[in-house]
Image (cartoon, helix red, strand yellow):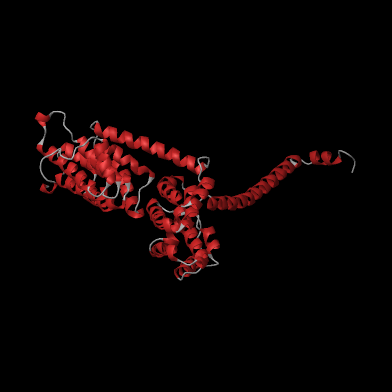
Amino acid sequence: MEPGLAAQAATAVPGLGGLSSYLVGAVFVVAMTAAGFLLGRVFGNRQGLLDSMRGGRSAITDETRRFAKEVVAALEEGGTSEHLFPLLRQLNTAEAVHELFGGAPLDALLSLVNDLSSADKDKRPHGDQLLRLLARIASYADDDTRMRILGAMIKVLPRYRHATPFLVEISKRVPDAWNDVQPSLEEAASRDPAIARYLRDAAGPQEAYVRQATELYMTSMVRFRRLNEDRASGAGGAVDNALRPVIEREFRFLRTAGTVSRRFVWLPAQAHRFHPLVTDEQLDLLLREAPSGLGEVHALLGQLALAWALEGSHAHRVKRIIAALEDAAQAHPSAADALLAVFMGLKSEDAANVRPDREEMRRRAYFALLAASERSFEVIKLLGAHGIPRDLYQGRADMF
């Protein structure tokens, strides 16, 4: 066919040229639709993979459930499991953690942690697997569950240094957890050079998670202070509702871990403002922990006693606090410091207008210091440093 003959033939038959264009367009649309469908399937699967890697929704298979049961059983028997690492790859969402380890399985794992300190050296792989699994659970669990895991590890840390890297691992995944564990790790580092070396390498101020934890700490501290200031200026319900969860969490951590978080120091500093929110249960916890020597607990007890004595309220609570601090001061200077804060804080500049109830509490704090000084040279030095005589009041300490 000569050049241009096809075009002539097309124009010779009416509508043939337009039909050809429509056919080409239709084929193009069908092809693009099919390609779009295939690309959607491919990239949809990739997006699902990315979601699981980032903590998105993860499908738990029957095999994974079986692995979880086998791993828990092996750890309960003091052994290890080859299924641990395949299981860890599936533990990437809160839903997976809750489904596989909520309730009894987690209780079983936590019950094993305290025994690690007395395990033989050949049980080290067992301990590593147990703590590695708990660290992964803590990284995706809710705050209460994470707190339980951190508490168990912190309690065993003084006798089992190998818990250190797993506490750091949790903090890397959840930076705010560093604010929970930092005081305990620093205390352990002061006694154990190996822990100190590890923290210098893995938890220095240049680490991203440490910087993030500090930013969170500072932001939360400013908010807590402002809430207390608002409360002091007369703001009511909404402010109290915002303060209570912060305060309750610190007490819950103290109860769970047997020590304080980095945030606990906020409480003594603001106790004169939030003291009406403290419950009997929380006070009982502080009194139980007073003999342990936690300076932050002693400071909070002293500030609460001072606030209630100045206000003329909760006399029974104040008496209990002074008695507990007297006992603790025989071994812990921080308790004597708390008693001194009560004694000095209740001093009245106007002797003619001294309230009897306030003066009674001041006398109690004074005689508590004298009693503690009979067994502690540190308390004797404290009294001397502040020029407090031993005959300030006439009478006997046992009159109270």
Asked whether 172 or 391 is in front, the reply is 391
Q: Where's residue 182, x and y in %?
A: 43, 46
x 32%, y 33%: residue:
226
Q: As displayed, is residue 98 above or below residue 334? A: below
Left of 352 or right of it: where is 308? right
Asked whether 183 or 64 is in front, the reply is 183
Q: As displayed, is residue 131 above or below residue 267? A: below
Asked whether 349 or 142 is in front, the reply is 349
Q: Where's residue 46, x and y in %?
A: 60, 51
Asked whether 109 or 312 is in front, the reply is 312
Q: As displayed, is residue 66 above or below residue 36? A: below
Left of 228 or right of it: where is 134? right
x 30%, y 48%: residue:
332
Q: As displayed, is residue 357 above or below residue 161? A: above
Q: Where's residue 264, x and y in %?
A: 34, 44
x 26%, y 50%: residue:
328
Residue 317 shows in the view: yes
Q: Where's residue 148, x and y in %?
A: 38, 56
Residue 237 shows in the view: no
Q: Residue furthest bottom?
A: 77
Q: Quadrant of residue 367?
A: top left
Q: Where, quadrant-wise, is the N terminus in this rendering? A: top right
Count of picture labels: 0
Left of 171 or right of it: where is 17? right
Q: Quadrant of residue 383?
A: top left
Left of 121 or right of it: where is 256? left
